[in-house]
Amino acid sequence: MNSSSSLHLSQQDSNNDELNHVQQVTLYKDLCQFEEDLQKLVVSVDKFSPDLQAAQDLINSDLKLYSTLEQLPLYDSIDIQLKQLDNESQEIDERTGKILSILDKCYNNLNKLPMVEQVEFEMKMMKKQKEKIKSGVLLEYAMKLAKFTRVPPTFNKDAIGPNNFIWPAEDAIRRGMLAMASLKSEELTRIPVELNSEEPQEPPQKGQSQEEDEVTPTHSSDTPSSKPDSKSESFEFTGKAKNQQSTQYSETGAHEEADGSIDLDLDLFNPDEF
Amino acid sequence: MSEPPASDRTLNNQTLNQVYATLTKNTSQQPEFIPQIFYALHQFKEDSKSGGNSLETATSSIRHRIKLCKSYLREDPHCIELLSRPYEDWPQVVEQKQQEIETKKLVHKQLGERIRAMIR
């Protein structure tokens, strides 16, 4: 009930505002004045006492009303200009809104990117970290690896030129291979029958057979009857071999101690050779 | 090029055109106000002897046209706003709006130049 009455009051207020506003319009005032003067004249005439002043006022109101009407085309031209300007302004505002939204997106995207100072700082840190890995460390690591490396198969040994290779000298390679063979002596010297019975034989590899040829050149000649295929004698670095090795070590404890006491300093490569 | 007579002129604004047509396009059924009132008075003088129509009845069409025009004006707030200012004030308002638009265009142009400079 209260809400409906308040709504009714608000509507009345808005109507009153509109009425007050429209009463400020000259044309509307002239129309009201003409209507009022006409009513005065009509009333006086219908009462058979014509009021001449009312007739004069009516004529003046008519003149004023039509003088105001003459301005309507001018108002119309102003209205056309205003509409054009409003349309243009609206287009510019819409464009401004689009530009602002795009700039806002760009701003957010730029904010997501790291700052230039931060990037430069990280680049400096990266460079410093790279500088910390010095060539000496790399060379030392390379020399450790080079103890067991071989001459690349593509290298032409007969070629004449400077002898600054990244691999060690031939005698160093041989010493390295012998050291490796001494570590695996039990594996290399065990009976091949046991190998065949305990673990499945891996398919022979050409590289491994060549390695064995270099490491144990006399091994195949020692047991020619028990192992006709020399490629099957190549040793493998598997966990099973270690287990077998441990059982064999238990049988030959003294020999194990002797192997354990071997100094496995494999630093056979002399960097001065380069 | 001469202006068309007021009765033939058409305005772009719908409300203004309706008011203008109602008050200025005079025909035999819709004559000018003062001649129509004069004729009504004359008829009243003639008919009064025989006790005929009153002047109020004879001028009812004038009052109807005036009420129509008032209702047209009341129903169009844009037209009320347009007519509430004197005509002489409007050129200044139009010029001010043109300046605002030029300022906005200038801002857009400067912004475009800055963005192009940043991209380069």
Image (tube, coloured by chain):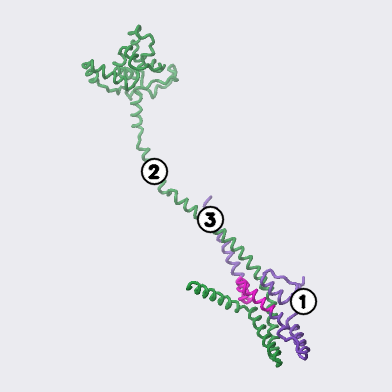
Chain colours: A green, B purple
> Dot 1 falls on which chain?
B
Determine which of the numbered discs, if any, sits on residue B27 in the image. Answer: 1
Boundaries of the magenta span: B64-93
Determine which of the numbered discs, if any, sits on residue A124 in the image. Answer: 2
Mark 1 vs mark 2: in front: 1
Q: Give SS at disc 2.
A: helix
Q: Which residue is mark 3?
A: B114
Q: Quadrant of residue A269?
A: top left
Distance (Cα) linking label 2 and label 3: 32 Å
Q: Quadrant of residue B86?
A: bottom right
Instruction: Report crowding for label 1: few under 14, some 14 to 19, many 20 or more residues within 10 A (C-alpha).
Output: few
Instruction: Report crowding for label 2: few under 14, some 14 to 19, many 20 or more residues within 10 A (C-alpha).
Output: few
Residue B55: percent from the left, percent from the top? 72, 86
Q: Residue type at mark 3: give it.
A: Arg
> Dot 3 falls on which chain?
B
Q: Give SS at disc 1.
A: loop
For residue A43: magenta? no
Q: Is residue A104 above or below residue A250?
A: below
Give the residue at x 40% y 21%. A163
Residue A114: percent from the left, percent from the top? 43, 48
> Dot 2 falls on which chain?
A
Determine whether label 1 and label 2 are within 8 Å by CB. Answer: no
Mark 3 vs mark 1: in front: 1
